[in-house]
Amino acid sequence: MPTPVKYPFLPSVGRGLILLTTTLLPLTASAGIVLQVKGLPDDLQQAVISASGLSAYATRSVSEAQVRRLFKQVQTQVDGILRPYGYYHSTVHGELDPKGQDWALSLQIEAGPPVLIEQVQATLPASAREVPAVRSSLRALRALQGKQLDDGNYESARDTVTSALTANGWLDAKLDTHRVEVDTRRNQARVELAWNIGPRYRFGPVDFSGSQFRPGVLDRYVPFPAGTAYTQDQLLQLQQSLTNTDYFSMVDVRPDMSHRQGQIVPVLVNLHPAKQTIYTGGPFYGTDTGPGIRAGLSKRWINRRGHKWSNELILAQRLKSLSTLYTIPMPGPNQRSFNFGANFLDANTVTSVAHTFEVVANETRLWHGWTRTLGVHALTGTFTVGKRGTESDRIAGLEHGSSTLVYAEGSLARKRMDNSTFVRRGWSLNFTARTTAGSALSSARFSQLMADAKWIRAFAGRNRLILRGSAALTDTNDFDALPPQLRFFAGGDRSVRGYAYQAIGPLNKSKRVIGGRNLLIGSAEMEHYFTPHWGMAGFVDAGNAFNGMDYRPQLGTGLGLRWLSPVGMIRIDVGMPVHSIYGHGVQLHVNIGPDL
């Protein structure tokens, strides 16, 4: 029987240095050395070159005696360089020739058969194997069986198990047995590992330091009760939850190991309050609103209970709005909050004018992976529909109305994406339902269902396909009492491009657009990026608002420019209607914001 030998792990010969050189290494000092390695895969050639040590002679001349000594030295190093990669039977044939003032050093290397891992024996108590993260890391370690012995891969898999133990409460875990035996005659290796994990630690009390809130307010953000098994994921979740509140400029969460009692570890949270009041403002331009200015004032908290308050004023060519929102956070696993808002709106589109005041109260929370909002709206005001551009409100054929509507609204929203800045794979879904409680508190009875979907998929490197769709249905006993924001129109940046905002919809007897009960829109867009930040798009949009079954989709098509700017994606589209009574010529659309 061959005698097994212990695996001679080299101290770090610089796996991190391997990729810093090329297969051919010229050293450009006078009487320098040119080293060439043949017969190995590229990564192993680079390993030999990096570990040879010849780069130390790059800026100084060497004598012939030094060159010959280095030549012999590098040949003897090859075996030790290749062993961490699983090659124990390498052979080297070298040639040394003068080449002008330099020396050409050539190594022809045969790595020989690799050593394969015959068996991986890893011993852990059952209590640790039941934890998913530990079980997964142990499975990855055992998956090395049958594969080529590789120092880096083995150590990474081994250390991942130890890290998983530490991250899940076994803070004293250590390797008791760590043995790798290599049978060089059979080219097989056996791995034997055993951990002494010690007791599993548990969370103690959480102490908040530096908070501006009264005691107990931040306890609702703690995702674990005292006595729960310690995990680093829970600490990260606590830190993320506190960071997302926007209350603090600094959040530092750490286990207080110096005050642990037995296996109970208290948690220390150091906080620094953020600036309480935020002012925002500046000019903007939107193809739906025209040029304007926006100003905002937000209070990150207004009392020691953590309530929030935000306000926004918009003064634009075709939109004037003043809104306020008061939020009461209710922290917990479902991220619940109560919201109370009011909004004054003076909107002037190419087809309508609305002067309305709205009060809203709702509750928002996470619900089975969705963001769910349930609330009540009270909307009152006057409006005019059927306009054409900037013409007077007194033109014949316009329809005027005023109404008060109290209705319930519920919505579900969900999105998934690989990157919020530039989505390569992602989608979003939004569903909304509205209904009045009869006509007791409202000028009319109505119910609505709405759905929006968007899907993004990158392909062939720098291309993206974007599909988008919207649908809506309305049932009402008095359509004329619905203001423009409760009617459906098509046209605009997020609808059918090639047409002005809300320019498409059913016509009244005077052939003027007054909006419809229902909506159906679809869009297909192809983007190609010439650089990581600049690209172009081609699109086809189709759809319309309609009543009953009288659906007559309008088509718009065009090209666009895309710029992934520091403030987000900027989209500039030029669209044209196709054989439509609702528009002609070129329509410019500018849109700034996230993909989903």
Image (spheres, grey):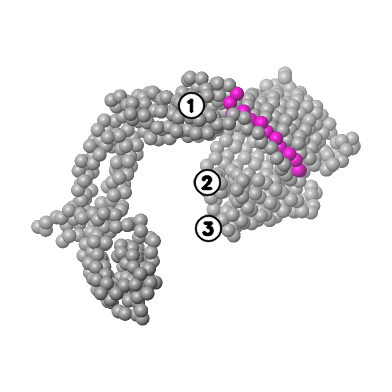
* In this view, 95 is above or below 188: below
- Secondary-structure class at tag 2: loop
- Secondary-structure class at tag 1: loop
Which comes sooner in the sequence, label 1 or label 2?
A: 1
Left or right: residue 422 compared with residue 381: left
Q: Is residue 299 magenta?
A: yes
Residue beneath disc 3: 461
Quadrant, the N terminus: bottom left
Which comes sooner in the sequence, label 3 or label 2?
A: 2
**Amino acid at pointer 3:** Gly
Residue beneath disc 1: 210
Residue beneath disc 2: 419
Quadrant, the C terminus: top right
Left or right: residue 73 compared with residue 541: left
* In this view, 75 is above or below 557: below
The alpha-carbon separation of the residues under discs 3 and 2 comes to 16 Å
The alpha-carbon separation of the residues under discs 1 and 2 comes to 34 Å
Residue nearer the viewer, 122 or 412? 122
Q: Specify few, some or many for label 3: CA neighbours under 10 Å numbering under 14, 14-19, or 20 or more.
A: few
* Magenta segment boundaries in residue numbering: 290-302
- Tell me where residue 404 sits by quadrant: top right
The main secondary structure of the magenta stretch is strand
Residue 374 can be seen, yes or no: no
Q: Specify few, some or many for label 2: CA neighbours under 10 Å numbering under 14, 14-19, or 20 or more.
A: few
- Tell me where residue 183 sits by quadrant: bottom left
Which comes sooner in the sequence, label 1 or label 3?
A: 1
